[in-house]
Image: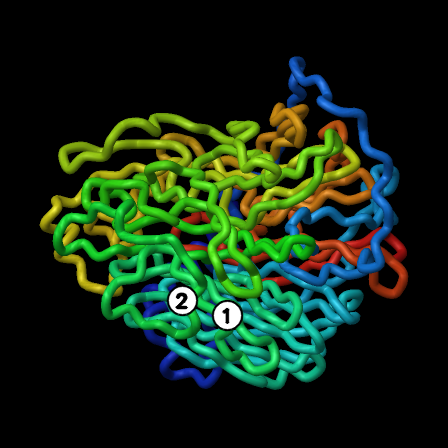
């Protein structure tokens, strides 16, 4: 109690003295003051934070659809984590087994790298060529994957975006690539961090940005733009020449309109306006691709997750299927030509993006599967042989999703705009034949603006159709008044779509999920708690709070002959009520490493 009173006294003094509002103008080290105030807020919030808790249950009706697979063969790249989801096909499985079900209880944090930033820390870490690479919205950095010592760090200056985030970098042939919030793609020298080229692919006047983590293959860098929640913003996918930054092809993910900027050769597309029946004054908007993408090197096909249409909640302003929003679009990676698409959410008025890259793999039963988990709360399994849906498995709370929105009353639904599957992909364990899904259980309340209010929104402004005078509620009321604020992890049979075990956390599971050949599944939650579970049984083997909210990469690799695990911590956001902590990377290993 004394500690609480002391901290509250400091806050009252700071407010009375004007510290929070204006002291930074009289101090040379503004960043240090920002950090100090942020740390203070974090300490206060931590007094009221509940410790992490999980509850696991098994499915009595589960029957394995196929015999367990033999141990996965060790790949040449097992020591590294060279891409956003490890492989271009996005399975996220590591065939390292030095840390396993027998010794996971001896895990410990070995070192921590502090970025010094308070930010929406979602970076998908990569480890390649003996260096661990991460990003913030303004920085890209290289650190030692065993000691956390900084090799180099490059800072970029540009105007801040409404949501300060970046989801990671890609590596190819001695170069690194990342997007920026002011609409560019940047390339750097892997060894020094020196900037090599830049290319603009988005229009900041329409609030378009490039927070996605690129992927790279055969001399090309693949990345798209966000901005689909803003009036006039349109998603596009690009391939850039890795050496020069030249745009090789561009593909519009929603119909191109007269006056739209064309930045490169157009990938062949069947898309037209026929699925967009917009009212006069409502420009075609949406379809951002804001996380990363998946590529099948065997076929040369690129799988692009596509976000929501806009205005997000006012479906009456844009009747129709609104292609290619809420879909996975399949393109020829070399030419950008359209090959196929999977329409995941048929008619979206809940802001249910296809929000993360799909995973491509072969199941134990021999199916060539595409698994994807959008924000609507389901895991979808498609057979890539004929593109047919095999199953649609609920993996979080789903309630009141059929009720239309209204200008006359509030409508409460789950999962909300911040619920379901967010920016991290499902993960496939070929040994257990499970798909692991990290999910958010959180709801949203929406009341619509009138049509005149919707249409009066200016180009480049948030365009959801939500009626609220509170700017933090532009995507609806993200409230915990209903007591719903949790996370789920399901272990789903990849052949049948039936879950064998699942756990519920008292914090959302936003971060990446990583299964390993050691029989583990590794994940964290928005309370900063990190866990190692037995992938086959759901038994908790290790768990500890290691920092702020975990919402970015969880990767494993070998450094100096020992297996390590790197975890991003310190995610903060105006939407998610998490502790205020600086963005850090924690590297874990076994005691004695």
Q: Which mark is residue 375?
A: none
Secondary structure at badge 1 equals strand
Q: Toward which corner of the image does residue 149 lie, by quadrant?
A: bottom right
Quadrant in the picture for the C terminus: bottom right
Residue 374 in the image: state x and y as whole percent: 48, 41
Specify which label sits upstream in the sequence, 1 or 2: 1
**Dots 1, 2 in contact, CB < 8 A:** yes
Between 482 and 251, the residue placed more toward the observer is: 251
Is residue 549 visible in this depiction of the protein? no
Q: Which mark is residue 209?
A: 2
Quickly name the residue at label 1: 179
Mark 2 closeness class: few <14, some 14–19, many ≥20 residues within 10 Å: many
Q: Alpha carbon of mark 1 to alpha carbon of mark 2: how far?
A: 8 Å
For the point 36% across and 81% down, which residue is it? 25
Secondary structure at badge 2 equals loop
The answer to whether residue 403 is above or below residue 176 is: above
The answer to whether residue 440 is above or below residue 117 is: above
Q: Toward which corner of the image does residue 175 lie, by quadrant?
A: bottom right
Residue 282 in the image: state x and y as whole percent: 18, 54
For the point 59% across and 54% down, which residue is it? 301
For the point 29% across and 47% down, which residue is it? 312
């Amino acid at each position: 109690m004394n500690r609480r009173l002391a901290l509250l006294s400091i806050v009252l003094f700071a407010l009375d003295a004007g510290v929070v509002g204006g002291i930074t103008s009289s101090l040379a080290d503004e960043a240090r003051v920002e950090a100090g105030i942020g740390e203070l807020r974090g300490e206060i919030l931590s007094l009221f934070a509940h410790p992490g808790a999980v509850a696991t249950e098994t499915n009595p009706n589960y029957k394995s659809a196929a015999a367990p697979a033999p141990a996965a063969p060790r790949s040449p790249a097992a020591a590294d984590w060279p891409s956003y989801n490890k492989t271009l096909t996005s399975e996220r499985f590591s065939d390292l087994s030095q840390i396993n079900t027998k010794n996971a209880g001896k895990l410990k944090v070995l070192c921590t790298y502090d970025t010094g930033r308070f930010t929406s820390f979602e970076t998908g870490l990569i480890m390649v060529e003996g260096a661990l690479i991460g990003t913030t919205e303004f920085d890209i950095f290289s650190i030692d994957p065993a000691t956390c010592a900084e090799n180099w760090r490059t800072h970029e200056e540009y105007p801040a975006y409404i949501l300060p985030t970046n989801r990671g970098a890609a590596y190819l042939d001695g170069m690194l690539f990342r997007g920026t919030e002011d609409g560019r793609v940047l390339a750097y020298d892997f060894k020094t961090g020196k900037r090599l080229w830049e290319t603009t692919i988005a229009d900041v006047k329409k609030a378009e940005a490039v927070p996605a983590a690129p992927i790279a293959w055969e001399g090309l860098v693949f990345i798209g733009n966000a901005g689909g929640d803003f009036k006039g913003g349109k998603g596009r996918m690009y391939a850039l020449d890795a050496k020069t930054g030249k745009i090789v092809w561009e593909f519009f993910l929603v119909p191109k309109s007269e006056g739209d900027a064309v930045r490169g050769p157009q990938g062949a597309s069947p898309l037209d306006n026929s699925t967009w029946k917009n009212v006069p004054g409502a420009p075609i908007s949406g379809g951002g691709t804001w996380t990363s993408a998946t590529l099948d090197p065997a076929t040369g096909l690129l799988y692009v997750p596509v976000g929501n249409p806009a205005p997000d909640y006012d479906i009456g302003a844009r009747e129709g299927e609104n292609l290619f929003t809420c879909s996975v679009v399949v393109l020829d990676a070399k030419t950008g030509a359209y090959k196929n698409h999977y329409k995941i959410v048929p008619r979206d008025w809940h802001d249910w993006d296809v929000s993360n890259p799909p995973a491509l793999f072969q199941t134990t039963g021999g199916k060539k599967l595409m698994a994807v988990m959008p924000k609507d709360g389901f895991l979808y399994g498609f057979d890539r042989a004929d593109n047919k849906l095999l199953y649609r498995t609920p993996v979080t709370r789903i309630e009141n999703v059929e009720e239309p929105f209204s200008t006359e009353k509030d409508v409460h639904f789950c999962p909300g705009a911040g619920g379901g599957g967010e920016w991290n992909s499902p993960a496939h364990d070929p040994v257990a034949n499970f798909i692991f899904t990290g999910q958010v259980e959180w709801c949203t309340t929406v009341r619509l603006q009138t049509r005149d209010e919707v249409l009066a929104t200016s180009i480049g402004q948030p365009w959801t159709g939500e009626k609220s005078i509170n700017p933090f509620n532009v995507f609806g009321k993200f409230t915990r008044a209903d007591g719903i604020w949790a996370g789920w992890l399901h272990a789903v049979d990849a052949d049948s779509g039936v879950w064998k075990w699942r756990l519920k956390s008292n914090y959302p599971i936003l971060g990446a999920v990583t299964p390993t050949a050691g029989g583990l599944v590794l994940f964290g939650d928005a309370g900063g708690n990190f866990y190692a579970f037995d992938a086959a049984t759901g038994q908790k083997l290790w768990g500890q709070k290691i920092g702020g909210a975990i919402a970015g990469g969880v990767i494993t690799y070998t450094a100096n002959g020992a297996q390590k695990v790197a975890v991003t911590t310190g995610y903060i956001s105006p939407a998610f009520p998490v502790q205020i902590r600086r963005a850090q990377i924690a590297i874990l290993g076994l005691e004695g490493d």
